[in-house]
Structures are given as structure tokens and as C-alpha cells.
Amino acid sequence: MNKRRIRVAALCASFLIALPTTSLAAPPTAKPRPKVTAPTKAQIAAAQAAENAKAAAAANAAGQLNSAQNLLQQLTTVTAHTRALLFSAQASLAFATTQFNLASAHAALTETAVSEANKTIGRMAASAYIMGGGFTTLNSVLESNGPQDLIDRLSVLNQVGASDSVALSRYKGAFVIAKAAQEAASAAKIAQANATAKVAAAKAAAVAAQSAQSAEVERLRGIQAQLIAELTKARNVRITLQQQLALWQLEQSSANTAARTKGQAKIWPDRGFKGRTTIRSTDAIRTKAVAYARAQVLAHKPYVWGAQGPNSFDCSGLVYAAYHAAGLGYPNWSRLNAALFFVDSQRVALTDLIPGDLLFYSYDGSIQNIHHMAIYAGNGMIWEANSTRTGLLFSNMYSTNGLMPWGGRV
């Protein structure tokens, strides 16, 4: 009889040992978890209002950019006008320079003619000196002692020869032309100086306008770059929020359906789902991720649908926050829902799990209906953000029905 009791006691003990460990949540002295709810319509409306404010700011910035572009157009017109003035001044300078060169050349020729005439007059003077008396009609008139003497002097001049008279006429004509040419050359030189000054002024104005235009262009580029960055950021925030909201809603919908679905398998059969062929984490990253998840569970953080820390989490939010804190950040890691985490991780057999691997739960064994995920802690245990009712837990990996037949390695 005693032997039979011993065998029954041993059998019961072995049966108890073989049973999987159930939830090992907070110790008896754990603080009560606060009651949490899903995001309210007021919170969503506030987010929409913030997005609208960003849109209004972006529209205002677009108006400022448009005004700046109008100013740039005006500066472009001013620059074109100053360039036209510069080209006109340069053309005037070229014309004045040509006129000056022509006048100078003409003056040089007349100077040569005067010089030749001077030589001729010199010869005449020498000849007259040798012959005695003057060599001009004026001298003859001034130095005559009377009508007879004047007649005699004119008779002498007539004897000098017609060539001397021609020389005198040429001398007078050359002198007049040379004087006029010199005056024209001087005027051309003044015109050239004025044109040069206008060119310098026009060039300075063009340079100033070009500098102002270049500065405005750079300012506009800065405004445009800032505007594009703000619009892109606002758009990314809006798209990210919309995507996250859709993912959270899908995950919550699947979780609600799972709560009402009967006959879920403890572990679903392998349907051949394939994931990534590579991993992005290291042993050190996985170790840090597990430590982060453990710290959140032991700190009794609440479960809030759609939250990703630091004060509250949902299931995929805890996974995201853990790996983000471990150093696996964007673009290698982003906030996904449980189903997308399954697709974006490498398949690992349940017998080959290591701490840091991910576990997934589906209410019908399909990927699209995965509703829950957790971080493997080792020895068949997981760190998880379970639900609003139970919060964050340290649990047995089989404590939730619908375990997918593969884990995921990040």
C-alpha cells in the first residue's frame, strides 16, 4: 500500500513538472496597473488639427516663396536693363574711340602739311632775305614809301614766282585745317573720356544688380529648400500616422477576432511561409533588446493600443521600442504591426529559438491574421505586451493559442 502511494505521488510530481509554465507576471507586491483605453476621437481630432496647422504653415510659406519669386523677376529685369546700358555705353565708347583715332590721324596729317608748308615758307624767306626786302604783300604795303615804291615792291613779288604764292596759300590752308583737326581730336578725346566713365558706371550698376540678383537667388533657394523640407516632414508625419493607424487598427481587429474565435490550434502547422533571407541584428543587439523588454515588464508599464513607449506599449510597439533602443534604427527598422514583423524577419524553427527572436500568434494560421507578437526570453518564456486587461507580462510562449510554427530573427 505504501509503495503504491509513493508511485502515485511520483507520477503526480512528474506530471506537474511536465506541464508548461503559465503566466509569471508581476510578483504579489506588484503595483496595480492603471486602466488604459484606446485613442479617443478627441485625440485623433487633435492630431488632425495639428496636421491642418502644418498645412496652413506650408501654404503661408508657399505664398512667401511666390512673393520672393516676383521680386526675383523684378531684379532680373533690372539686371537686364543695366546690362543694356552697359552695352550701349560700350558701343558709345567704341564709336568715340574710333572718332578720336580718326581725328588724331587727320591732325597728324595736317601737322605734316603745315610742316611742309613751313619748310616752303622758310625757303621763300631765305630767298627774300638774299634778294632783300620782305616776302608778303602786307610787308610790301607796310614798308612802302609811297605809291611808286609799292608798285616797285609788288613788281618784285611778281618776279618771285607763282609757286611761292601757291606755297603761301597752302600754308594758310594747312594751318586752318590742322587747327580744326586738333580741335576735333580734342573733342573726340573728351567724348572718349565721357564714354569711358559711362561704361564704368554702367558696369558698376550691372555688377551691383547681378550681385543683388545672385543674393536673392540664394535666399530663394534657402526658402525653397526649407519649404520642401517642411512639406516633406509634414507629409511624412501624416503618412506615417495614417499607416500606423491602419496597422494598429488591423492588429486590434485581429486581436478582437481572435478573442471570439474558437478552436484555434495551440501551434499552427507549417504552411511554408518564407521571410527574409538575411538578418540585420547581432548577438549584442538582441541581448540589448531583450534587456529593454524585460525592464519595461518589470516596471509594470501599461498596455496601450498603438503605443510604442516610453511609458506604455502594445505588442508590436514593445518589439519596435526594444530593438530601436538596442540600436537598430531607421531605415533598417521601423514601426510595423505584428504581421509585417513576421514577413520582415528570417524564419527560425521553434526548436532553434534564441533570446531576442520574435514569436507570432494568428487566430487562423495565416499571416494577415497575425494579431500578437512577443520577444523570446529563453527557456520557453517570452516578454510581451499582452492586453489592456493583463498589461505587460513575462509568460510561457504557449500561453496564447495560435502560435505560428516559425519564429522570426531580426
Image (cartoon, rainbow, N blue to C red):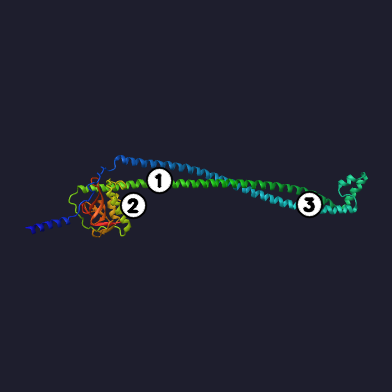
Q: Secondary structure at mark 1?
A: helix
Q: Which residue is mark 2?
A: 325
Position of the C terminus, as image quadrant, is bottom left
Which label was assigned to residue 114?
A: 3
Give the CA distance from mark 1 to mark 2: 28 Å
Which mark is first along the chain, 3 or 1? 3
Q: Residue furthest front?
A: 2
Q: Is residue 149 visible?
A: yes
Q: Amino acid at mark 3?
A: Val
Q: Amino acid at mark 2?
A: Ala
Circle 2 Cα neighbour tier, 10 Å, few/some/many (<14 / 14–19 / ≥20): some
Q: How far from the left and from the top, in percent, is residue 94?
A: 64, 50
Give the CA distance from mark 2 to mark 3: 102 Å
Which label was assigned to residue 231?
A: 1
Which mark is first along the chain, 2 or 1? 1
66 vs 16, nearest the viewer: 16
Q: How far from the left and from the top, in percent, is residue 339?
A: 27, 52
Q: Is residue 281 visible?
A: no
Q: Nearer the viewer, mark 1 or mark 2?
A: 2
> What is the quadrant of residue 38 in the picture?
top left
Q: Nearer the viewer, mark 2 or mark 3?
A: 2
Position of the N terminus, as image quadrant, is bottom left
Circle 3 Cα neighbour tier, 10 Å, few/some/many (<14 / 14–19 / ≥20): many
Q: Amino acid at mark 1?
A: Leu
Which label was assigned to residue 275?
A: none
395 vs 217, nearest the viewer: 395
Which mark is first along the chain, 3 or 2? 3
Left or right of 231 on screen, residue 12 = left
Q: Secondary structure at mark 2?
A: helix
Left or right of 94 on screen, residue 179 = right
Left or right of 228 on screen, residue 33 = left
